[in-house]
Amino acid sequence: VAIRSLLSFRVGVTAVTAEVNPDYCSPPPPDGCDEVCQLGSASSLGGAGHSCALQADNAVRCWGATSDGQTDVPADPGTVKQIAAGASHVCALTADDAVRRCWGANNWGQINLPERGRGGVKQIALGFGHSCVIRSDDTVNCWGRSGQGQSSVPRRLGKVKQIALGTDRSCAIKMDNTVQCWGLVREVPADLGEVKQIVLHSHNADSCALKTDNTVQCWSDDNDNVRDLPDDLGEVKQL
């Protein structure tokens, strides 16, 4: 199966690969899920997981846990070019740069699209119960769960290149390649420097960044293991 990108909400990792072995997918993909362009995976804190795939014909397929309707793809989601999966909700970005459909859990209003979140969108990212988009002017708009301020975008954030969401926090790579986070655990290492990709773990405060020199730096407030990278890791293309 040809894959362009592989996404995981639970582990907060994005990987690029030429092929996917169904034995490594949990839950495994359904029959007929062929020629996949993008695969989005998610797992709730309770352990029940769901996955969604954007197929080569732009159709969206979801499978796995569906207690909140997260695998019930709308009949006409439009021509989709990106999918994003949260803990129990899914959103689709269409070819006309609009987020027209989200489905699944809505206990915090995470699929209630605000007007500023609908059109002119470059990227969408989902967390445990909140959602964020980068708009065409490179500003960020978030909505949904915000008990720790994870949906309250800092006023001085400015323009950004990428956003990443976790359980109770959000992070963005700014135009100068520095990282700013908000919500729970906002601190980033003082020596982090310039970054071109960031990923957040959904269950805790673990974070990893791919720096502009192609090295990786990880940090956590309570997990020393995440900082212990392999000695022979070397240069990295993507996390």
Image (cartoon, helix red, strand yellow):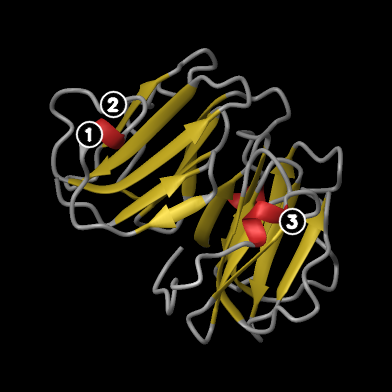
Relative to 136, say whether 175 is above or below: below
Provide residue 137's location: percent of width, then percent of height: 60, 73
Q: Position of residue 87 (x, y in %)?
A: 58, 32
Q: Earlier in the sequence, mark 2 or mark 1?
A: 1
Q: Quadrant of residue 27?
A: top left
- Vertically, is 69 above or below 192? above
Instruction: Tell me: residue 61, above or below residue 71.
Output: below
Instruction: Return the residue nearer the eye: 225 or 148.
Output: 225
Residue 118 in view in this figure = no
Q: At numbered mark 1, what does the secondary structure look like: helix, strand or loop?
A: helix
Q: Are marks 2 and 1 in contact (CB under 8 Å)?
A: yes
Q: Position of residue 125 (x, y in %)?
A: 56, 51
The residue tagged 2 is 28
Mark 1 neighbour density, 10 Å: few (under 14) some (14–19) many (20 or more): few
Residue picked out by circle 3: 220
Q: Nearer the viewer, residue 58 or 165?
A: 165
- Residue type at mark 2: give it: Pro
